[in-house]
Image: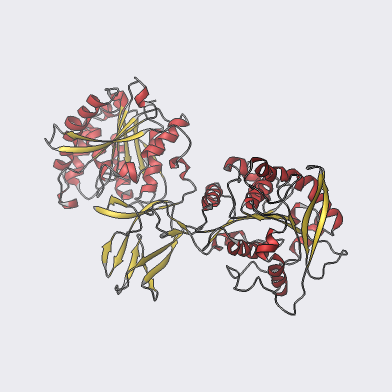
Amino acid sequence: MALSLAVALFTSSAYAQPTDKEMPKGFDQVRPGIPTGKLDSVQYVSKTVGTTRKALVYTPPGYSKKKKYPVLYLLHGIGGDEKEWLRGGNPQMILDNLYADKKLEPMIVVMPNGRAMKDDRAVGNVFDKDKVEAFATFEKDLLNDLIPFVEKKYATLTDREHRAIAGLSMGGGQSLNFGLGHLDKFAWVGGFSSAPNTKRLEELVPNLEEAKKRLKLLWISCGDNDGLITFSKRTHDYLYENNVPHIYYVEPGVHDFKVWKNGLYMFSQFLFKPVDGASLTKYTLLGSPASTNVRSAKYPQILPDNRVVFRVKAPSARKVQIDLGKKYDMAKDTAGFWTVTTDSVSGGIHYYSLLIDDVALADPASETFYGMGRMASGIEIPDRTGAFYAMKEVPHGDIRIKQYLSKASNTWREMYVYTPPGYDQSAEKYPVLYLLHGGGEDQRGWATQGKTNLILDNLIAEKKAKPMIIVMLDGNLGNTGGLAGFNENVLRAFENELKQGAIPFVESNFRVQPDAQNRALAGLSLGGLQTLYAGVKNTDLFSSLGVFSSGWFANNPKLSDPQYEFMKDNASAINRNLKNFWISMGGKEDIAHQNCQVMMKKFDDLGIKYQYSEYPGGHTWPVWRHDLHGYAQVLFK
């Protein structure tokens, strides 16, 4: 039996997956001279509803009761019935033409009425409560009444591998709900422009591992201008984050049959054949606008495999490039738009520039962030490991922007301050982490690029971090000489600002625990050097230090040697005072990696205790988000 099923499933391995990515124009019209399938109107007894119900059944050209066929159940929308596909989609013509082109496995297609109630007509207010609930009731009608009827009346294969379900709009939601909820019944599931009846994600895919194991194909498609695309997008995002293979197909269009016919055309060609899982992310016409796009901007778009499509209008430009760490030449069309598709980009936020005739500019379609010493475009790429900084339904803290007159410099300065959930309703005093940005950035970096508030909100909700205040300081103190002008005086100026300006202001304006055991310091890159300097010299003020992607310069002994000398003379006090000396690096590709290795060897020689970790990704914000996530969990415990 198992052998016969395997043979049946793979007999058509010569039929490749679709080579085209959309239905040719006119493909839904009658093609003279080809074999055609047959449409039957059938009635079946529904014990679920307590009445006789109707369905349309398409049998393929040459249908014979001597052969057994797989079955696709094709569902309509909230305003339709069993004839909606027939009236608006010409499914029989699409299927006939696919058979003629040898692109389809012979199958039976059942188009039922998904409104499971005694009066199931699409009349009156189709959004009435009882009519909407009838779409959920159809689950029992489908499983207990319709499928047994079809399998008794027609020559069908009755195992899950030969049963598919798909639908449009409300029927798309039904298909996802019923198909993913009954993987013992369906191996092929498709949702075209799925409606809000789609279940919440954790309910929709209750067993992720089972879904990965048992699904032959999960298809989600929608038009880019469909008002319901958010439901398809959130389903795709959840599946992507949890590594469930699927196709997320976005095309130009709205909530209409142009999109749904194309969905049937594409989805049906995959059915009941071997599926190449590695190719699934390539099936789409469009990407999704990046979350960092300005309002209503369609580009940049992120494709399912994290390649990025950039598009900009510059009709008079001679050359346009995208600089995303790697430079990409853009191609110009006749309307003056320049376009390029990048390689796959790693998850998290990345700075980029438009280069128009070799001038670096911000992309007007993207949000800008202060980085690289200027306002730069940034793009947020989906990250499977990024759930720790996702917006979730948990209590949220606040980011507060505070200006203060620094007693150290007698100048007005600015800090961003994260206060944990419940701060305003509590009389509690909190520990404080002072968190420092890198070179070319400022106090905004950790709040915007770093997503500090979301990281801490999620950690606190999971009870993995203690509620704390995080103070994000401006570490820029007048050094305009770059690396050449970077010396101990610059570091000393920061130390003075921290001790005489920032800490006194925070402890006078926020409810904090004003002692070393409840005070921590950390920073990335330049901020890591500031932490090494001000933190190590003041372990009577801080119980934890975090150094992200940083290290004393191996080629600058004038700066570094005095620091090591200080640590040698104070090693016992440093080890005694610091609960955590936390050092992390973005792998060997991190530009600070070598300096850090040299520094840690010095620490070993000096007997300085520390903890070290690496997370691949280089000298980038995705790494530093991960660093904060790890570091925050060890603080104040």
Picture coordinates of residue 589, whole percent (x, y): 37, 53
Picture coordinates of residue 538, whole percent (x, y): 22, 30
Residue 281: image quadrant is bottom right
- Is residue 114 visible to us here? yes
Q: Quadrant of the C terminus?
A: top left
* Nearest to the observer: residue 518 or residue 586: 518
* Nearest to the observer: residue 127 or residue 206: 127
Q: Is residue 213 above or below residue 462?
A: below
Picture coordinates of residue 118, whole percent (x, y): 76, 45
- Is residue 464 visible to us here? no
Picture coordinates of residue 352, whole percent (x, y): 33, 58
The residue at 58%/68% (across/down) is 22
* Nearest to the observer: residue 207 or residue 569: 207
* Nearest to the observer: residue 40 or residue 224: 40
Residue 500: image quadrant is top left
Q: Is residue 380 left or right of residue 433?
A: right
Q: Quadrant of the N terminus?
A: bottom right
